[in-house]
Image (cartoon, helix red, strand yellow):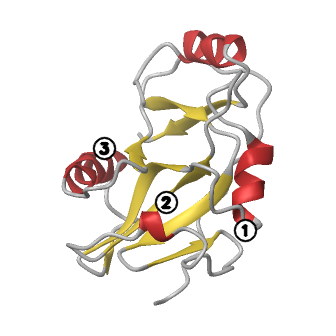
């Protein structure tokens, strides 16, 4: 297992709608990279034993995403995911995958974003785990997505320019 450092987000006050941009919900959890038989944080802390329900078999891949715990008043609960991270095995978790870093053990970060999203969708369809899900995204209406996230008490929106 080779530790890969993921790309980090930059903060912005407003969401805009521009051609060549996709928009995703920003979850309030723990950034986690998940491979077939291991997981680790963006800082390289190995978490495989803490989250055994995220292990899967099949094509050798490395997924990038956010580990969340379902909330009662919001879709995610940061305190609950931290409780699980600290050892509370009873706490339910959900892994929201938003990118694929390696496929068949090959780095694919140089692939265009839309190709990686399509490949991620295909890979996730073959992973038999109710705990691993795809982060939804759309190509337009950044302001509307941002407002929807605010209405649902979520952290915000991730805007990714791909052109």
How far apart are labels 1 and 3 at the CA level? 36 Å
Above or below residue 2? Residue 87 is above
Q: Residues within 10 Å of mark 3 (few under 14, many from 20)?
A: few
**Residue appearing at x 64%, y 19% in the figure:** 149
Residue 112 horizontal/vertical position (percent): 33, 52
**Which secondary structure, mark 1?**
loop
Q: Is residue 24 left or right of residue 45?
A: left
Inspect this view and state whether residue 7 appears: no
Q: Which residue is mark 3?
A: 114
* 147 in relation to 42, above or below: above
On the image, which quarter does residue 134 sit in? top left
Q: Which of the labelled discs sits on residue 87, or is there none?
A: 1
Q: Is residue 86 left or right of residue 2?
A: right
In the rendered image, the quadrant that contains the C terminus is top left
Left-right relation of 2 to 100: right
Which one is in front, 124 or 139? 124
What residue appears at the point 23 percent right and 57 percent down from the top-left corner? 123
Q: How many marks?
A: 3
Precedes in sequence: disc 1 or disc 2 = 2
Disc 2 secondary structure class: strand
Who comes first in sequence, dot 2 or dot 3?
2
Secondary structure beneath dot 3 equals: helix
Q: Which residue is mark 2?
A: 64
Nearer-N-terminus badge (1/3)? 1
């Amino acid at each position: 297992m080779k530790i890969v450092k993921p790309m980090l987000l930059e903060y912005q006050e407003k969401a805009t709608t521009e051609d060549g941009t996709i928009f995703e919900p920003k979850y309030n959890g723990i950034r986690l990279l998940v491979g077939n038989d291991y997981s680790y944080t963006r800082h390289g802390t190995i978490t495989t034993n803490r989250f055994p329900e995220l292990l899967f078999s099949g094509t050798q891949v490395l997924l990038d995403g956010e580990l969340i715990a379902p909330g009662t008043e919001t879709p995610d609960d940061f305190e609950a995911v931290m409780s699980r991270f600290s050892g509370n095995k009873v706490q339910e978790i959900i892994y929201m995958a938003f990118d694929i870093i390696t496929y068949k053990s090959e780095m694919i970060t140089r692939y265009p974003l839309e190709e990686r999203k399509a490949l991620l969708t295909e890979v996730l369809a073959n992973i038999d785990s109710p705990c691993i899900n795809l982060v939804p995204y759309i190509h337009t209406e950044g302001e509307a997505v941002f407002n929807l996230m605010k209405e649902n008490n979520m952290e915000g929106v991730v805007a990714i320019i791909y052109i």
